[in-house]
Each structure stands twice: as structure tokens, then as C-alpha cells.
Image (tube, rainbow, N blue to C red):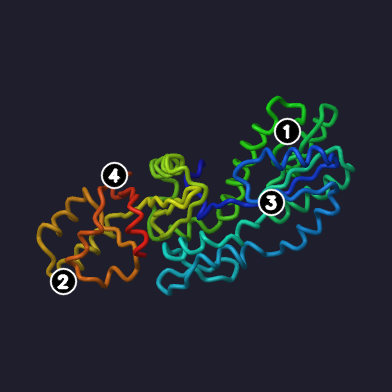
Amino acid sequence: MTKYFPAVMYFQTSIILIDDDINFLEIAKKNFANISEIITFSSARDALNVLNRMGSFFHSNSVCKIITKVEATEIDFNGELFELSLRNSLSYAKDKEKNKLISVVIVDYSLSCEDSLDFCRIAKSIGLRVIMLTGIATDKVAVNAFNEGIIDRFVSKHEENLFLTLNRIVEEEKMSFFENLHSKIIPYFFSDTNLTVNNREYFKKFNDLLKKSEAIEYYMIDHKGSCVFIDPIGRVTILACQNDADIEKYIGIAIDNEADSTFIQTLRNKKKILFLLADSSINSPVSLWKNYLYEAEIISEGFYCSVITNTDLVEMV
């Protein structure tokens, strides 16, 4: 069954490139885009030391910093309790330490055969994506390694526009790295609604906005599929998602607080959705909630979204 949902988060990471051709390593450093850092080695054995130091870097330093423990929606993932939040996401985006995370390794097969394959096996065992650079004579070995699951992709060094191809493949594999990392927890993050997971329309909307916003990182900010996208110069775009239950909850609160009838009717019409950017906003006077109404689009029955690009509001979070 095709699964239609994005990773919980995505940001720029580092890659390892191993090749015994020093000139090639120097050229490569100048020809990769959207990479936080390219760590180069001339031998697989030296690169292994970096992998051994990685340990549980992601779980201890990346996911948990963007999460706050909230009793009502706590999730147990590898022994950690966490929940996404917009405030933490925007703060975490400024933390450059996360970009040291290694997601992809590129290995030249012209190195010692056993060293190359052993390195690939270890990299795969800790969840990294592995690309092998091959020559014509070694393509068969690469195919066998791919079939055995030792590598994820292979590219011939003789390919025309090599770095254009490598940049595209590395970007795809970085995304796969995050998708694989989060695949087991996606159903839990979206456990309070079945409208996001495997929702083809939502997935299309998400990907369209990811491209349109020119984001280089994104973070889910709630369990409905709402997400914050951040472009290279720090501009923020938010995809706000709600379902019928969310809207009814806000209508109930508005009625209890004697909100203006026009405001209540706006919520009932569902042509606009109320999206409170800060957790504290729900405690603000209902008369101010009109400032947080956004034009709604129906994604599927009972599921709505808005695109928010007002960065001034984001600064209020």
C-alpha cells in the first residue's frame, strides 16, 4: 500500500564522501548544494571512526529538542516522551548543531573492496542512506550490493553531469533518511485523526507548499499535520490543518465566552479556520481571536487547511 505522509521534520544535514582521489574530493566540495557540511575521507577505515562517534546523536540531540512533554498527547518513542510545538520548532531551527547530523554517505568502490562494503554495511545498520560511486568495471558489484540491501543507490563516475545527478540523488536520499527514521512514529503523531495519514490530497498540498515556499527545512507542529516551512533566509510559511472536531471545540469555547455571533457563524461556515499560533492565545479574550482567522481550503471531507505567510504573527509565538 502506498503511504502518503511526510517525515515529521526535515533539515539540512551533513554527508560523508569517501574517495582515494584527493582531487575528486576537492572538486566535490565545490559542487554540492544544500549540504550543511561535506566530510571527506580518503579511506573507509578513517570514516568509520566518525560513524562510531555518531551513536544516538539523532535521538539525543535532534528530535528531543523540538519536543515538549505534554500529558494529553505524550508519545513514547525509544523511551522518550515528546510532542511537537511551533515555538520549539522555530527556536530549534536556529540551532546549527543539528546540521552536523550525517544522513547520507557516498563511497567510491575503487577503494579496497572489503573496506568499502564493510563501511556500507555499518552505515546502513545505523540508518544512513548509502550511495556508491562506480566505474564501468564495477557496476555488477554495485548491482549485487544494491540487491543485497548494502547500498541504496549507485552512480557511475563517468556519467555526464555527474554532480548534477549526485545533487539530485543526495537530496532524495536525505528525504528518505528522515522518512525512514520517522516511519514508525508517524501513526502515533497523527493518532487523533485519520485524515492526515495516507491522505493523498494532504500529501499533495504538503509537497506543493514545500516547493512553493522554497523551504530547506520543515517541522510538524501538531498532530493534525500542521507544519512550519523555513526558506534559506529564514522566511516562515505555515500549513495550518484542522478537522471538524477542532472547529467544534473552538465554537464551544466561543459560545461559552459569549463571542460575537458573526464570529461564531464564520467558524460554522468553515470557510475560515481559527489557528492560534501560540499556546497561550487560547487564554486570550475571545474578541481577539478574529486576528487568527485564515481562509480555509477543504482538503478532504471534514479536513481543512490554511496557508499562513504573515511572519509578523509568527514573531508573536
Question: Residue 295: x and y, percent?
Answer: 25, 48
- The residue tagged 3 is 128
Tell us which disc is closer to us: 4 or 2: 2
Asked which secondary structure carries label 3, the reply is loop
- List the residue tagged with mark 4: 298
Q: Is residue 66 left or right of residue 193?
A: right
Q: Amino acid at mark 2?
A: Asn
Q: Which residue is mark 1?
A: 155
Q: Residue at x 17, y 66 (%)?
A: 287
Q: Position of residue 285 (x, y in %)?
A: 20, 70
Which amino acid is tagged 1? Val
* Mark closest to the chain's N terminus, 2 or 1: 1
Measure the C-alpha gap from mark 3 to mark 4.
Answer: 37 Å
Dot 3 alpha-carbon crowd within 10 angstroms: few under 14, some 14 to 19, many 20 or more: many
Q: Amino acid at mark 3?
A: Leu
Query: How far apart in space, not on screen, are marks 4 and 2 (Cα)?
Result: 28 Å
In this view, the residue in front, 116 or 184, is: 116
- Which badge, 1 or 4, is on the more N-terminal residue? 1
CA distance for labels 1 and 4: 42 Å
Report the residue at 87% width, 47% height from top.
115
Q: Is residue 111 left or right of residue 283?
A: right
